[in-house]
Amino acid sequence: MTTMNTPSATHLVLIPTYNPGWKVYETVAAARRYWNPVWVVVDGSTDGTAEGLLAMARDDPCLRVIVLPHNQGKGAAVLHGVDLAAQQGYTHVLTMDSDGQHPADLIPAFMATSAQQPGCMVLGVPVFDASVPSLRVKGRKVSNWWANLETLWAGVGDSLFGFRVYPVEPLRRVMRSQRWMRRFDFDPEAVVRMCWHGVKPVNLPAPVRYFRPEEGGVSHFNYWRDNALLTWMHTRLFLGSVLRLPLLLARRLIDDR
């Protein structure tokens, strides 16, 4: 089992972050307890956390902090980190949010599953507790239904949960081939397009916790803006799935044999 003292030459943890508040320090410290290396991409934060993260990295050679000059969106931050990871020979990245919602203690298990099935993407399927807003759960069910329709039920357990391991090169090819997936639409569009390119999902359960503002929780989710973005995303993905229907059907027949 890889620990923080045994660096992986193939798998790294990648944490995109934008104005996350003080929870980011706990998140990064927890990720470092369970993995080496950990990279953080600061997506133009203006809340002072970039400086705090850089200070953490000065005391930890296994932590790398990349600061982007202005906010570009979650997907753009991930792509920046993935490009750098590819340049340094990494084959897989585990992405996780910086707000403390994702279970850092499951990083080794997700990485081990990825190492056993390197051609697949390992998707976290959230296990909610009482802290989750009911509106989020209902919206998630809708997005998951569309993602499964668009992939012809290829096995996507959850389309929105950002705790997952991607193979680097397929993700880069998918993102570089079109201009979408740069903001909040990154997580669901990534799984759909990766399925279209033949990358199979492997689903693992993962507990998730939503923190209240007084607990350090910070959310940049805008109900109308982000749901409009998801609606447009699923519209174009559905149209794309119709164009790919013969290929998707052929794959489904092969998988069902």
Image (spheres, rainbow, N blue to C red):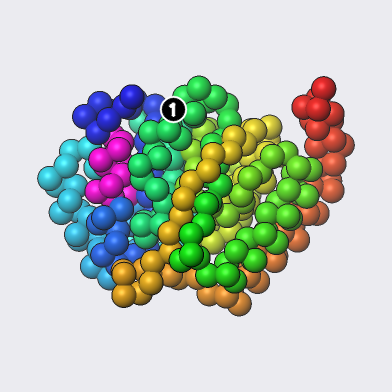
Tell me, yes or no, if residue 97 can be seen here.
yes
On the image, the x and y values in percent for residue 89 come to 39, 27
Residue at 30% from the left image edge and 58% from the top image edge: 24
Is residue 19 something that shows in the picture?
no
Dividing the image into 4 quarters, which one contains the C terminus? top right
Nearer to me, 72 or 101: 101
Asked if residue 170 lies left or right of residue 251, the reply is left
What is the crowding at mark 1: few (fewer than 14 residues within 10 Å), some, or many (at least 20)?
some
User: Eyeballing the image, is 154 above or below 75?
Assistant: above
Q: Secondary structure at mark 1?
A: helix
215 to the left or right of 229: left
**Residue drawn at (43%, 33%) of the image:** 109
> Looking at the image, which is closer to me, 75 or 209?
209
**Residue found 46% across the figure and 50% down from its top:** 207
Residue 121 lies, with reference to residue 53, above or below; the image says above
Quarter of the view holding residue 91: top left
Quadrant hosting residue 227: bottom right
Q: Position of residue 203 (x, y in %)?
A: 58, 38
Residue tagged by mark 1?
A: 112
Residue shown at 30% from the left, 38% from the top: 34
Q: Determine whether, in the image, residue 235 is placed left or right of residue 79.
A: right
Q: Quadrant of the N terminus?
A: top left
**Residue interval drawn in magenta:** 28-40
- Comparing 55 with 173, the one in front is 55
Q: Position of residue 116 (x, y in %)?
A: 50, 22
